[in-house]
Amino acid sequence: MSNDNPYSENPPASMPNAGIPGHPGPPPGMRQRSSFPLWLIICLAAIPMMCVCTGILAALLLPAVQAGREAARRMQCSNNMREIGLAMHNYHSAYGSFPPAYTVDDQGNPLHSWRTLILPFMEEQALYDSIDLTKPWNDPVNATQADTVVAAYQCPSSDLPGGRTTYVAVRGPDTILSGDVSTSIAEITDGTTGTIMLVEAGADHAVPWMSPDDISVDEFVAGRRSNVRHIHPGGGHALTADGAVHFISENADSGLREALATKSGGEAANLSR
């Protein structure tokens, strides 16, 4: 009986199962391998999930990181104010009074700020000696000095040019730095612990550090209502006449602010309010 299968004797090489009766596919040694290993496929599939998880984690951690950085900048700002306060007291020890808010020429025109006058007490003697105090701060002869960066006059949270500062005196008829006259500690009858000399204003009220410009009592008392936007969230630092630095809330009431600003008004200022 003839075999109806024409390939039973010599199966052609093109038949994948030739010579292996009952086997469903090619022999093991002849199996085709995948172009991508399984582990690589798994890794590629996991990448989008990893990116999503990383993004979520970063979004959760970012506020904490930002808060930590602001806390460090706020601490450095407080240290700047303490350094200024120490210089103010060293000036008082040398001259018997705190510096005036500004110096004037023979006609009474403001020339230089208290920030210039305390430079020798802030390890900036060379800078102080290079300034021509007989000419205004913005005279061309003082241009280089006015552009000089004094690190202690710059809040690290501010984004201001090097020649500008947010550390200003509160000026008014009964403040410690009221104009071209000096004030001694004995004249602060409201007490040095409850009377401010300097405050940290917002960026909108930044001034060139050499200029005889500061902030008025009315602006300080008005607080948020005067559009003084603080650099730090919630408020700004203040330096009292005893050399201590306090953080004044932007929500502090006007009565407290007014009591803090004056040196002999008879008000009892409580900084815990």
Image (cartoon, rainbow, N blue to C red):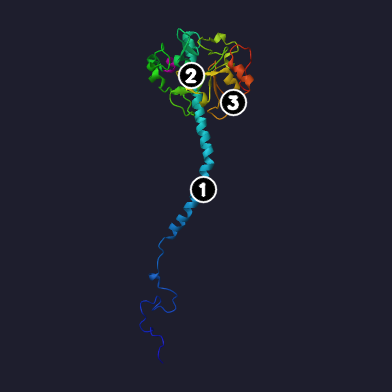
Callout 2 secondary element = helix
Tell me which secondary structure the magenta stretch mostly adopts. helix
Residue 58, given in percent of the width and then of the height, sits at: 51, 43
Cα separation between marks 3 and 1: 41 Å
Q: Which mark is residue 224?
A: 3
| Up-down relation of residue 7 to residue 222 (above or below) | below
Callout 1 secondary element = helix
Q: Is residue 113 magenta?
A: no
Tell me which numbered mark, 2 or 3, is placed earlier along the sequence: 2
Q: Which residues are magenta?
A: 119-123
Residue occupying the point 50% across, 51% down: 49
Tell me which numbered mark, 2 or 1, is placed earlier along the sequence: 1
Q: Is residue 75 left or right of residue 140?
A: right
Residue 163 appears anywhere in the view: yes
Residue 4, given in percent of the width and then of the height, sits at: 41, 87
Q: Which mark is residue 103?
A: none
Residue furthest bottom as drawn: 1
Q: Is residue 121 magenta?
A: yes
**Disc 2 marks which amino acid?**
Ile
Q: Which mark is residue 53?
A: 1
Examine the image and state in which quarter residue 6 appears: bottom left
**Disc 3 marks which amino acid?**
Arg
